[in-house]
Image: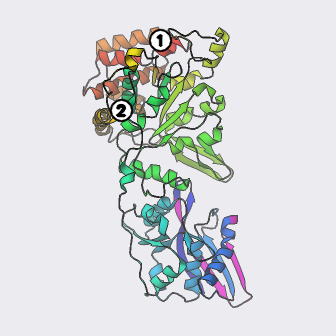
């Protein structure tokens, strides 16, 4: 006799349906799992057997062969346990209404006692189950709210094996879980810009960067507020769309980083890795490739503090993700592609001691040491950072001001207004790799020609800047993107010379520090 149950497997942030086939025969008592399982799946035999016994369910004294199809894809993790158990229950006629499981998907890890433990990647698997035509999905109780985000499929949260048995036997039917937004999902947990004294230029640069999704470099002496400003940028970023929330939640779900009290990430992520990290930790990798910091920062901010202290190999690995908005990790087991459309924010001192160019404090570094320190940042990476702004030291008058600075809420209101203009402009536009364009920073050459048309005065100003600053073609395009964002913040349909001039000023550090 052969019985069937359905579950889902993970491949990156994508998921695919897995058919669990159970064959039993009156032979020697054997329990085998085939279908290219990894060690965690092979160990499911003992978890399933113990769950049967401790739930006081009879385990068949016969030959049991379980096949996980498709058999040519490697099955990894413990989420197949529940489906394997259900297939055996159906095979041994322990479920009276077994036909009701034909359109259901079962996901969960079994404990030896028969309890069902939470697993990672449930959101991805729920989407796969819906796409495969399943009408119901049974998941661990702790994962139920996460799965309920997916509309069009009934979600049942299950605490133990007996609840599954009683549900299909009609004794205690389970109630579907409905999605209930958590207030914690919408609350901004980031510090406010009203705490930042002075630094009007840096705050203006942060506003422009947030509105257009532009990369930002803050450079200046120690204690001027570079990190303070960077950590407040998420508080002025525009609200996430539902599609962005789903994509970000999928990445955090498979990484096991989804908060236990949240089913959907609605606040843009902020990742701030230490400078001792490795390239695979940043880009993603491992024997089983997992998302790196660039993917965990998807639709949010990746903050690299003390940029020159990062290993050169680490910072250079950012170049392709910054251009493509996705990263492909290749291993012997296959190729996985993760989204990584993030806003890069960097902070650094101008030299090792930190006081090169300071108006009052003397720099103790040798010229060769300053050059060596600055040269740790390559030209190609620097060229990909749209805004490069100096954060000067504050004087006593600025430090002692009594007026409260502008709040993040006020800045965010302007950012949201500008971002809505961009979303309307780019609603039918996509990049060469197929990503939907949502902000000016994602424009490619064809979009720049279409949406950044210059008047004769603007063109003349751009020509002067191009020759004086020695801009590359990429640098030229990035100034136009910046000018487009500045115009959107000013609610101007056309780019004006004042917008071009401000955009040029935001890249003026090329000549002062990076000669």
Nearer the observer, 269 or 384: 269
Judging from the image, what secondary structure is the residue with disc 1 in?
A: helix
In the picture, measured across the screen, residue 452 lies left or right of residue 110, that is left
- Determine which quarter of the picture holds residue 11: bottom right
Would residue 30 be counted in the magenta stretch? yes
The disc at residue 20 is none
Which residue has dot 2 on it?
211
Residue 420: x, y in percent?
29, 38
Q: Which colour scheme appears in the figure?
A: rainbow
Q: Residue furthest bottom?
A: 26
Depth-wise, is mark 1 or mark 2 nearer the camera? 2
Judging from the image, what secondary structure is the residue with disc 2 in?
A: helix
Picture mark count: 2
In the picture, measured across the screen, residue 328 lies left or right of residue 344, that is right
Which region is colored magenta?
15-39
- Determine which quarter of the picture holds residue 482: top left
Q: Residue at x 46, y 64 (%)?
A: 126
- Residue 204 visible to the viewer: yes
Q: Is residue 387 above or below residue 336?
A: above
**Image quarter of the N terminus:** bottom right
Which residue has dot 1 on it?
469
Q: Is residue 511 above or below residue 211?
A: above
Q: Residue at x 61, y 17 (%)?
A: 353
Residue 412: x, y in percent?
32, 35
Residue 185: x, y in percent?
39, 52
Nearer the observer, 473 or 293: 293
Q: Residue at x 50, y 33 (%)?
A: 323
Q: Residue at x 32, y 39 (%)?
A: 423
- Residue 447 visible to the viewer: no
- Magenta stretch mostly in which secondary structure? strand
Near mark 1 (Cα within 10 A), the count class, few <14, some 14-19 or many ≥20, is some
Query: What's the distance in space between the residues labelled 1 and 2, CA to CA?
Result: 25 Å
């Amino acid at each position: 006799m052969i019985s069937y149950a359905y579950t889902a497997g993970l491949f990156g942030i994508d998921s695919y349906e897995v058919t669990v086939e159970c064959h039993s025969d009156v032979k020697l008592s054997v329990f085998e799992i085939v279908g290219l399982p990894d060690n965690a799946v092979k160990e499911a035999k003992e978890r399933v057997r113990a769950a049967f016994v401790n739930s006081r369910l009879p385990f068949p004294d016969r030959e049991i062969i379980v096949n996980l199809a498709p058999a040519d894809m490697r099955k990894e993790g413990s989420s197949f346990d529940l489906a394997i158990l259900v297939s055996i229950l159906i095979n041994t006629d322990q479920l009276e209404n077994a036909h009701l499981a034909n359109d259901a998907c079962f996901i969960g890890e079994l404990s030896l006692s028969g309890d069902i433990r939470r697993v990672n990647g449930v959101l991805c698997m729920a989407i796969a189950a819906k796409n495969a035509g399943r009408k119901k999905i049974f998941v661990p109780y702790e994962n139920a709210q996460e799965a309920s985000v997916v509309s069009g499929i009934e979600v049942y949260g299950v605490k133990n094996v007996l609840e599954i048995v009683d549900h299909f036997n009609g004794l205690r039917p389970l109630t579907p879980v409905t999605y209930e937004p958590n207030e914690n999902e919408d609350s901004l947990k980031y510090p406010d810009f009203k705490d930042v004294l002075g630094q009007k230029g840096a705050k203006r640069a942060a506003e422009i960067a947030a509105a257009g999704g532009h990369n930002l470099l803050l450079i200046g002496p120690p204690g001027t507020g570079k990190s303070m400003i960077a950590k407040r940028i998420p508080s002025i970023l525009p609200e996430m769309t539902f599609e962005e929330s789903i994509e970000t939640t999928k990445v955090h779900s498979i990484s096991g980083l989804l908060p236990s009290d949240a089913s959907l990430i609605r606040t843009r992520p902020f990742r701030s890795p230490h400078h001792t990290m490795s390239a695979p930790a940043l880009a993603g990798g491992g024997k089983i490739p997992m998302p790196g910091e660039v993917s965990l920062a998807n639709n949010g901010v990746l903050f690299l503090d003390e940029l020159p202290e990062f290993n050169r190999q680490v910072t250079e690995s950012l170049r392709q993700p910054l251009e493509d908005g996705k990263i492909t990790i290749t291993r012997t087991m296959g190729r996985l592609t993760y989204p990584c459309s993030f806003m890069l924010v960097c902070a650094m001192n101008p030299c090792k001691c930190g006081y090169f160019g300071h108006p009052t404090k003397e720099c103790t570094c040798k010229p060769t040491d300053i050059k060596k320190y600055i040269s740790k940042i390559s030209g190609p990476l620097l060229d990909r950072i749209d805004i490069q702004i100096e954060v000067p030291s504050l004087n006593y008058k600025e430090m002692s001001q009594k007026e409260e600075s502008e709040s993040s809420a006020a800045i965010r209101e302007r950012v949201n207004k500008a971002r809505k203009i961009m979303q309307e402009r780019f609603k039918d536009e996509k990049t060469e790799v197929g990503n939907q364009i949502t902000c000016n920073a994602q424009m490619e050459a064809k979009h720049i020609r279409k949406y950044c048309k210059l008047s004769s005065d603007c063109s003349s100003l751009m020509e002067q800047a191009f020759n004086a600053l020695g801009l590359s073609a990429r640098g030229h395009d990035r100034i136009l993107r910046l000018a487009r964002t500045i115009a959107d913040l000013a609610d101007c349909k056309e780019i004006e010379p004042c917008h071009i001039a401000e955009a040029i000023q935001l890249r003026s550090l090329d000549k002062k520090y990076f000669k």
